[in-house]
Image (cartoon, rainbow, N blue to C red):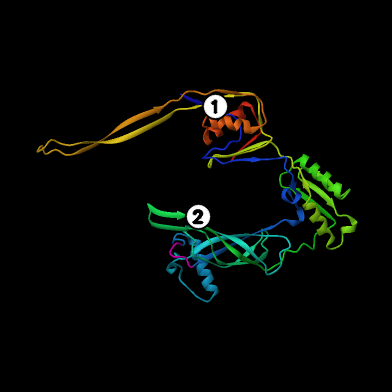
Amino acid sequence: MRKKILVFVIILLVPMAWLVTKAWADARVKDIASINSQNEISLIGYGLVVGLEGSGDGKGTVFTIQSLVNMLQRMGVTVPVNKVKVKNIAAVVVTASLPPGTKKGSGIDCTVSSLGDATSLKGGTLLLTPMQSIDGSIFGYSSGPVSIGGFNVQVDDDNKIVNNYTLVGRIPGGFKVDVGYSMEDFDCRLLQLSLINPDFTTANRLKNKINSVFPGSAYPLDAGTVELVVPDSLQMKSGWIEFVSRIENLRIEPDVSARVVVNEKTGTIVAGENVSIAPVALAHGTITIAIKSMPVISQPAPFSQGQTVESRESFIEVQDEDAHVVYFEERTNISEVAAALNAIGATPRDVIAIFQAMKQAGALRAELIIL
């Protein structure tokens, strides 16, 4: 049996993407935190994409037919429901985000996603679609030609060519803001910084850095929030903007927990610099069995009135390689283990299986996240 030794580390293999993060690198405050008062508003709308070339929803998509009939009735056109064909129309959900400070009349990109059984949104145009927030408030309307950046050609059920995903597209600047998202109503004397990845050490470092520039202005509330008191000299209408701008461009060293993130679907593994392993010996083996089937043709003798008979004969091939067992001492430099993994020809699936086993054995000193 072939036994491979796989150890914990970050490596570069051809079929697998390895990414190494450096927790010690300084980062701008604006890249690791955001002002609470600057939350985006998520918007959603339901609409119709028209002008499709026979790739729209089928007759079984009832809500598309109802939407079309209702729209025509509002325009003074009465059409029997059973006479409507929607092969050139698709029902879609439109989503967009409204950033703070957006003014009326601004154009924002929006995403269009198919709801029914359409096969493609290529060449379609979104009709005027109201965009609303979670409380039902209308902030504007989306419309325009849908860009999908691909194509879908299908001759029959078994023969088709697909380039990119054709049921989700974007409309650059398609969402026209009708109600501005002003920031004039919030208290500009007391702000809060929210860390994207909450961590007590990072929050404390952030507090110390801000207070070194603006003494007594920062107070950490928890692992993810640092409260900011705007200095009296900057509390005029535009002064707090200068205060926030200077804080956003400060640099600190964020602290990151040791984590290994594994995506089994794509074979991607991402590990942080703080990941380490306990002294451990690892062995991992595989047996490859290939079963092949070949046709065997039996011909009848001449003038025997027999028939040609086709049968199949199976061959089984087993590959069994020598075992490789390696012992690794405790180490935190993952590049040292990477060389060993490359040397034994570890595959992405091998590494993922080893990570899971090491976590169960308590040898992996990091949080293992499987997507």
Residue 5's mark? 1
Residue 15: % across, % down: 51, 40
Q: Give whichever of discs 1 and 2 has the lower sequence position.
A: 1
Is residue 329 rendered to the left or right of residue 169?
right
SS at mark 2 in the image? loop
Give the residue at x 60% y 63%: 172
Front one among 340 and 303: 340
State whether the magenta stretch is mostly helix, strand or loop: loop
Amino acid carrying mark 2 in the image: Tyr
Residue at the bottom extreme, as displayed: 76
Is 250 located above or below residue 139 in the figure?
above
How many residues crowd mark 2 within 10 Å: few (<14), some (14–19), many (20+)? some
Type of the residue with mark 1: Ile
Magenta-highlighted residues = 51-55
Q: Nearer the viewer, residue 89 or 265?
A: 265
Residue 344 pos. (x, y %): 52, 29
Q: Is residue 173 above or below residue 225?
A: below
* On-image quarter of the C terminus: top right
Residue 201 is drawn in which quadrant? top right
Residue 75 appears in view: yes
For label 2, the residue is 165
